[in-house]
């Protein structure tokens, strides 16, 4: 599957301007990271943050709608090609056996080989695909997630300790943002979404609002 790996994080439409992350090293700095360890240090203004976040949103939408289908197509071609090649190799190896036994051994041979390929996908490729899906899920549900989380700690029920810590220690205006998204699993984002939707359906009164120390963004340099 080596031919599909470059498509996960880097796409030609964004080239060297592909943003890999946004962080706040300190109260006076917004750090925007790019491919190959490159980065820019900017003033942490609303304008700079929104431009960076919107860029990541555009990247995510492109990856989800264009890159993932291409990966699936490539994966299908690779697997089908592998089956054919393995089958041909196995047939030549077992040609001296009776026809029924040939088929049984070829099938066993191919199944075992594809199992090894599936393991490689699960430990590397699928993790990267999952991250693309997670980012797009976040952008599709960002307002709902943040509105619900801020209202009550109960919205974090059944999420991991890492997710709870990332959200409660996050200092951005939004409790869940591109700043801490890397620490939050796709599963936990869905759990939070489900908790919020259950609350909305049952219309219970909420308590125990989320308490965080927010680092405010700087006024835009264009503002007087």
Image (cartoon, rainbow, N blue to C red):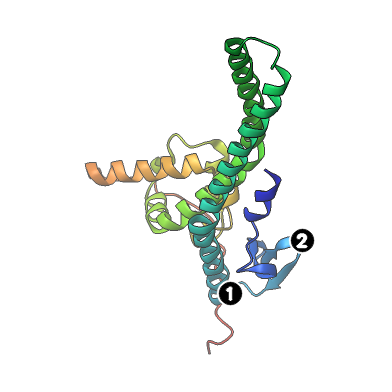
Give whichever of 52, 73 is nearer the camera. 73
Local crowd at mark 1 within 10 Å, few (<14), some, or many (≥20)? some
Q: Answer few, some or many: residues within 10 Å of disc 2's Cα (few below 14, many 20 plus, some between 14 and 19).
A: few
Total marks shown come to 2
Using the image, determine if residue 114 lies above or below residue 102. below
Name the residue carrying label 1. 48
Q: Residue at x 48, y 57 (%)?
A: 65
Instruction: Classify residue 179 by image quadrant.
Output: bottom right
Horizontally, residue 64 falls left or right of residue 198, namely right
Q: Residue, x 63% and y 42% (percent of image)?
A: 125
Please say if 202 is above or below 6: above
Residue at image mark 2: 37
Can the viewer see residue 54 in this picture? yes
Q: Position of residue 36 (x, y in %)?
A: 76, 61
Measured as percent of width and height from the top left, residue 188 is found at 48, 41
Q: Tell which residue pokes out farthest to the bottom in this image.
A: 224
Image position of 176 with respect to 44: above or below: above
Name the secondary structure under disc 1.
helix
């Amino acid at each position: 599957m080596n031919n599909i790996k470059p498509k996960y994080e880097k796409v030609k439409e964004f080239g060297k301007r592909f943003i890999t992350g946004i962080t706040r090293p300190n109260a006076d700095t917004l750090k925007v990271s790019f491919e190959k360890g490159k980065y820019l240090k900017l003033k942490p203004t609303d304008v700079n943050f929104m431009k960076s976040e919107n860029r990541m949103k555009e990247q995510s939408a492109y990856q989800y709608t264009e890159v993932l289908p291409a990966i699936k197509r490539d994966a299908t071609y690779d697997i089908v090609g592998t089956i054919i090649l393995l089958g041909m190799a196995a047939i030549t190896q077992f040609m001296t056996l009776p026809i029924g036994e040939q088929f049984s051994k070829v099938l066993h041979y191919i199944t075992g080989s594809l199992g090894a390929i599936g393991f490689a996908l699960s430990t590397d490729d699928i993790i990267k695909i999952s991250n693309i899906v997670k980012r797009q899920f976040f952008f599709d549900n960002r307002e709902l997630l943040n509105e619900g989380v801020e209202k009550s700690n109960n919205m974090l029920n059944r999420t991991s300790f890492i997710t709870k810590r990332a959200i409660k220690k996050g200092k951005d205006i939004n409790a869940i943002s591109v700043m801490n998204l890397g620490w939050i699993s796709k599963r936990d984002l869905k759990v939070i979404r489900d908790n919020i939707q259950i609350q909305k359906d049952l219309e219970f009164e909420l308590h125990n609002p989320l308490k965080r120390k927010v680092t405010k963004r700087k006024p835009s340099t264009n503002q007087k």
